[in-house]
Amino acid sequence: MATHVTTIRRTMEFAVPAALLAGWWFLGQLGVHSFYFPPLREIWASFQQTWLFARVGSDVVPTLSAIALGYAASVVVGIAVGVLLGLLPRVNEFLTPLFDFFRALPSSAAVPILIVLLGVGMSMKIAVVMFSALWTIILNTSDAVGSVDPVARETSLSYHLRPFDRLMRVVLPSASPQIVAGMRVALNQSIILVIISEIIVSSSGIGYFIENAQWTFDITGMWSGLLLIGVIGFALTKLFQLVERRVLAWHRGLHRKAQL
Amino acid sequence: MSETVERVLDRAARPGRRPKISVEGLAKCYTVGGSVHQVLGDVSLSVGENEFVSIVGHSGAGKTTLLKCISGLESPSGGRVLIDGEAISGPPKRLALIFQDYGRSLFPWLRVLSNVTLPLRARPDIGRGERRSIAMAALTAVGLADATDHYPWQLSGGMQQRVAIARAIACEPDVLVMDEPFASVDAQTRSDLEDLVLELRRRYAMTAILVTHDVDESVYMSDRVAVLDGSPTGVSQIIDVGLPGERDQLTTKSLPEFVALRARVLQAVRGHASTEEAEDA
Amino acid sequence: MIRTDEASYLAAAPEPTARPGVWTRSHALRRTTLVLFALCCWQVGALVIHNDVFPTVPAFLTAAGQDIPTPQLWQSVGATLAGWSLGLLAAVVIAVPAGLLIGLSTTLDVATRISISFLQAIPSIVLLPLTVLVLGATLQMKVVLVAIAATWPLLMHAIYGVREVDHVAKETAQSYHLGRRLRALFLYLPSAGAFVATGLRISATIGLMVCIAAEVLSSTPGIGEQILLRGSNGADPASAFVYFVAAALLGMTISVVFRRIERAALFWHPGQRNRQGA
């Protein structure tokens, strides 16, 4: 009885997006389209031509590497600094408003300046990503490490755990949900900022391709790039969620219990 | 004893008058994943007007499920619940439910007075001023007349539960249903709240059903104690509490009758546990 | 049912422990020390980097002194604010009712789940070339782009807010026979409204970033355009930095304001109460 309901649900979930796509396809077939919104069939043709797999090396790889490197740098530096700050509450309290300020500022405004300072290569893209994502991770990490449940802390103290063990087995695990939350936001920021920097000035990358397509009025090409970014963004987010589900399975279970 | 005999004896306790609440052959199943889990098997119980009945049983016996069926929040898989002779479908009017988790049942974004007046807003015949005075009367009855402007979470657990009780009696219910209301409260506060409920029930002439895991409490508060047991769950025993109507924490609880009743109830509840242990051994 | 994947998306970027409005002497002292510390780092950094686009503190102050009286600075700020505010308003009008409806209806929720999940993962900035094509480098283009970018956090938070209304509270409302109007006003609005306030804060921040990005990328009038103009063409690099600081201050103001709004809407939430030591 219950499985019956879930299969209906599943089909509904997929039915609607499938119907929308089919609608777009058929509208195109019927000749209903505008210059700016070409038929799905043409976009798909352009997509196949471009991204499967002609321009993978020249554009997809640079974009993905920029995202990966920028994100990794932000995460590594951010967590390291964040943990250190979390363990030094006075310093943390002092510096947090500064990090807050940097997090609040619109990082796209920094791109022209960073371009002048660092040129148009990979190092600029990494710097741009870090300028946006680093603060998020630092703030989330330092906050999480600094506000470990006092009961957990006191338990570990009363059982005479060594400081290193306390850090690795109590503080970091209990801080991990919030750290991971920060990492998720940082992933979104990384993708956005790499695209922005590629659109402004670059000689390769998906962002560059889209911008170039716009200049040359290659509308279907532009849409194919858009589609690709959508797929990449979606895939990366889902991948992150998968890893997160594994790593934080204990937290989900605990949270679920508390809600009942 | 077979269940039919139980039911006959049950009705014999109050000859003639129709019971206020009648639970007839109640069954409830849940489907979790692919398997069907039967929580309540065949529960039958009647509660007379102005009677106080406690329902006890070991954890997992389905006390809360039974209560949810009685208060109309869940619909049974089998059997029915009658109130004043009519089968219910959905939460019945003139029945107020007090939840165990007062922190989540009281709305934290409303002040105490607003929390108590909220259910009254559902009655179009009661105007604003009257709402307020009814709520104030209820809050005074529970001793919280000067906490009206606080938010619930600014009060202690016992006081929060009092607010919940005030909210319930402001609606002037005929039936008061309580789901382990004092479980999240410390022992001293618990005795105060027990006496408060007894007093209010007497003053406002309500029928009451209390679900509790506390055996002492069940004997102290009620006229009869129903023990849920069995797999699937049914009413295994109904124990008459023949204690005098006036209950007092000190004197009543030292009466030899109280001690004996308590032992009987505990035995009935434990009866399940010891059979399980015997089977394991 | 908690969809923790979405839940954590939404709880992302939690605000660090704030001490609301407590301006004690030590607090002010700490802030001043921090500003001085930041200025020192700035000066050292500028000397190390040795590039006009990152001016030393005195060079910056000179450039600021020249730029602040000019109408251009304020016009740019106005243009950016216009695009941002109109876009955010549009997003609120679209996303909040839609989110509430979707949250309340299981059918709608299931039907739209995958589409929303996919669409919100697309970085809205990628639509810039398309919007520029269709609408040109205009205010309307900025408004549309900001609206699209700001819609998703608001939508997700509205849906989540309705879905995660405490089920004990819901049962209480049911057992007390609260009608639809009463439940909407006293149960769903405060409860979901708190989450919407958080979504609003996130949307406001994202909206500003997208607005300025649009200005940079397409030379639409606004702060972003000015930064690009003065910076990359080498015309007036220190001035570019002044505009950059203007953008930063704008961002900070918006963040502070919306955080206050969020805190006000969440005053009753246990997590919030603990932070304030209530």
Image (cartoon, coloured by chain):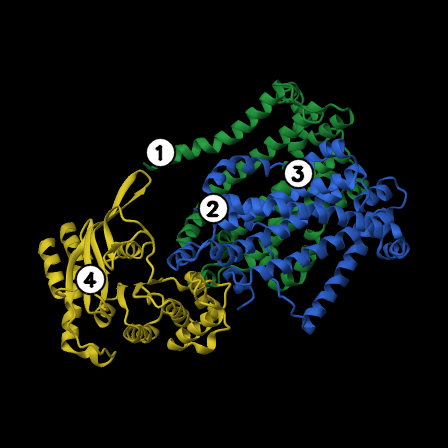
Residue at the extreme front of the image, as rendered = B125
Say which colour chain A has: green
Whole-number angstrom distance, CA of label 1 to CA of label 2: 30 Å
Instruction: Give the chain letter at badge 2.
Output: A
Q: Nearer the viewer, mark 1 or mark 4?
A: 4
Please determine if labels 3 and 2 lie on a single subunit: no
Residue reaching furthest bottom? B251
Chain of the residue where label 3 is placed in the rendered structure: C
Nearest to viewer (mark 3 / mark 2): 3
Instruction: Specify the label residue A4 is tagged with.
Output: 1
Image quadrant where residue B34 sits = top left
Distance between the alpha carbons at the discs numbered 4 and 3: 65 Å
Which chain did the image draw in yellow?
Answer: B
Q: CA distance from mark 1 to mark 4?
A: 41 Å
Q: Which residue is label 2 attached to?
A: A248
Tell me where residue B122 appears, x and y as whole percent: 43, 61
Which of C66 and A162 lies nearest the eye of the viewer?
A: C66
Q: Residue at x 50, y 61 (%)?
A: C270
Residue A38 makes an appearance in the image: yes
